[in-house]
Image (cartoon, grey):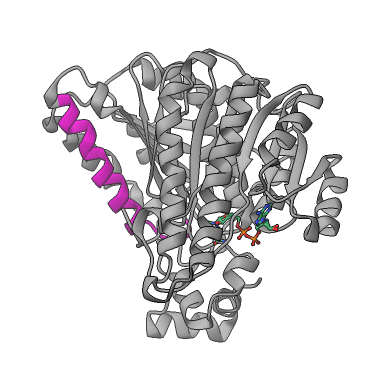
Amino acid sequence: MTDRYQTFTRTPLGRTLVKNLGLPDPTPLPRWTEGSSVIDGPVVFGAITETDTGKAIQAVLRDIGATFSTAAEGVASSELRPKALVFDATGATSTADLTSLQRFFSPVIRQLGTAGRVIVVGRTPELSATPEQQVAQRALEGFTRSLGKEVKRGATVNLVYVAPDAHDQLDSTLRFFLSPKSAYVSGQVARIGTGPLVGNGPAAPLAGKVALVTGAARGIGAAIAKTLARDGATVLGVDVPQNANDLRKVMSSIGGSELLLDVTSIDAPQRIAAAGAELGGLDIVVHNAGITRDKRLANMRTDAWDAVLDVNLRAPERITAQLLESGALNDGGSVVGVASIAGIAGNNGQTNYATSKAGVIGLVQSLAPRLGDRQIRINAVAPGFIETEMTAKVPFAIREVGRRINSLQQGGLPVDVAETIAWFADPASAGVTGNVVRVCGQSMLGA
Ligand code: NAD
């Protein structure tokens, strides 16, 4: 589906109208392509004080080959616009230290390049050493969410909270937030805990891994299957028998295998577990299959309510339970639920859908602390407006509003959701569990 308004704003007449009438001006967002570097411009790094986290951040910047300078050198001497501003705020021990945010960002924020990146790294507030530190760290959320609404030209702003002693887990998360893989992720808070130092390296992070993707025949599911395969995974794609042709096309393009079933059927969990076991066990499980049956609650039919709850919530719940119980999900694995911003903010006409998607977040939050002993991680993505068949069915006026009411003033692409899932699935993201990350261009809906 094309965003005709965005195309129009790139024409000479469109530019004039946008400028004179103050209309939304969505910047085309670059996406990651094979062979491109993590970041294609200079990075300016700043910190409140020297910390182990700051050293780890600089080590990652060196590793990805970024040209970077510290605040003092960079802002004064850089000829080029910085592509990213990375600030280590873990050293904030009281609210007095918050001054450093303004001192670092105010002089340089206007120079941030097109599709620039701002990353603030803080200490997980609840794991702070003192109440004063907790207050200062919690304050960072307000800063980053507001700055996300101020930056222009397709830039994003995100906050990464790191637990004490987890700075060695920063690599995969910083790579994700610095690169075009996070093009449509802004105003988000990621939390990193401790974990084993594992991973195949960034070239083929999922090499040797087997990934189950439900609803893989089209839309976001097809993009997830392709992205996980790009990163080296063998994919087992699931979809309903009616979509057999589409599923076959996607799976044959990536050398994956297909399993035709309805995820709500009684025997679906057993059949999925058996197919996974045949492939040597599953390492990645993505519960993407989902449906909508929108009506206000007063007009909601029982079958529409039940169908949405069954596909979106009960099926992921039952399948996950079976995979855990049967051992078909390998230790060290990664489960990802696909929620929705409707499950966070609520949406008129979507009580059934929002209930199911908030339940997916509940599933993540209930299981994350319980699966640590097997090193299994579980996270959720919450997409906002993504250009797919599902959103193509939305009436024009509502669709146009959905596209524009976010900081990036456009809809996201299926690949944006897929890239976020690939970051969760990467074994190097061992410290990333219990997260709910919205892929919504910082939608104005919800927190
Ligand atoms: P889509 O309708 O284009 O694709 C969904 C796929 O799931 C289809 O191939 C469908 O056949 C399959 N599926 C549906 N019911 C199934 C069942 N019972 N068993 C097996 N497969 C089944 O939808 P999409 O836009 O790609 O959405 C994918 C996921 O993302 C869904 O969970 C959706 O709720 C979520 N989401 C989408 C958006 C968006 O803007 N498109 C926003 C928020 C969340």
Q: Is residue 134 magenta?
A: yes
Residue 393 picture quarter: bottom right
- Residue drawn at 43 percent across, 46 percent down: 359
Foreground: 127 or 312? 312
Which segment did they paint magenta?
Answer: 133-155
Q: Residue at x 40, y 32 (%)?
A: 366
Residue 48 position by quadrant? top left
Q: Is residue 38 visible?
A: no
Is 402 within the magenta? no
Please tell me which residue is depicted at 66% across the width and 27% down the height of the picture: 202
Residue 437: x %, y % from top left: 45, 43
Q: Quadrant of residue 124?
A: top left
Does residue 23 sit above or below 356 in this rendering?
Answer: below
Spot occupied by residue 391 in the image (x, y as percentages of width and height): 57, 69
The x and y percentages for residue 273 are 71, 31
* Magenta stretch: helix, strand or loop mostly: helix
Q: Is residue 233 visible?
A: yes
* Numbered marks: total: 0
- Closer to the camera in the image, 247 or 324: 324
The image quadrant in which ligand 1 is located? bottom right
Write the residue at 41% across / 71% down: 349
Depth check: 374 or 128 in front?
374
